[in-house]
Amino acid sequence: MDKTTAMEIIKNESLENYCFFCEDINKEEAVVITENDIEWIVFTNDERGTKISEKVYKEESKALMDFIERLRGGRALRQYINGKRGVD
């Protein structure tokens, strides 16, 4: 996977709550992907913008796949929570 493909998936699937190689890596409740000179880093921020579940990759494609999977998981969780609220 490359950055263009990842952005197409994000757009086509209406994924949200992310920071895609942006500067605001402390965004609350967001999935973040960033890079430095030698590696790609994917992590999730909690409701306070605190970094949790960080994973470091040597290959961009693997980092992008993890990033997309986390976004999809977040969407599924939000849909589940919203569905539960509608049951009452």
Image (cartoon, grey):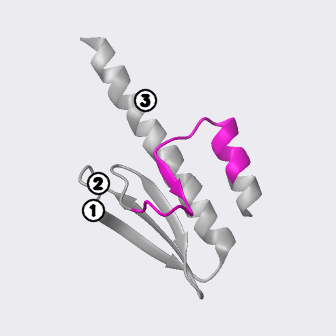
Start-end of magenta stretch: 7-25
Quarter holding residue 85: top left
Front label number (3 vs 2):
2
**Any part of residue 5 in sight:** yes
Quarter holding residue 15: top right
* Secondary structure category for the residue under label 3: helix
**Any part of residue 1 in sight:** no
* Secondary structure category for the residue under label 1: loop
Give the quarter of the figure containing the C terminus. Answer: top left
Q: Which residue is mark 3?
A: 79
What's the distance in space between the residues labelled 2 and 1, CA to CA? 5 Å
Could you tell whether 80 is left or right of 13 in the image?
left
Give the quarter of the figure containing the N terminus. Answer: bottom right
Q: Are marks 2 and 1 in contact (CB under 8 Å)?
A: yes
- Residue 23 on the magenta segment: yes
Front label number (1 vs 3):
1
Q: Residue at x 36, y 24 (%)?
A: 82
Ranked by sequence position, the earlier of labels 3 and 2 is 2
- For badge 2, the amino acid type reads Asp
- For badge 3, the amino acid type reads Gln
Q: Position of residue 59 (x, y in %)?
A: 65, 79
Q: Which residue is mark 1?
A: 50
Label 1: how many Cα within 10 Å (few below 14, some 14–19, many 20+): some
Q: Which residue is mark 2?
A: 46
Quarter holding residue 31: bottom left
Does 19 appear above or below 79?
below
* Secondary structure category for the residue under label 2: loop
What's the distance in space between the residues labelled 3 and 2, CA to CA? 18 Å
Nearer to the camera, 24 or 74:
24
Does 67 appear above or below 75?
below
Q: Position of residue 72 (x, y in %)?
A: 53, 45
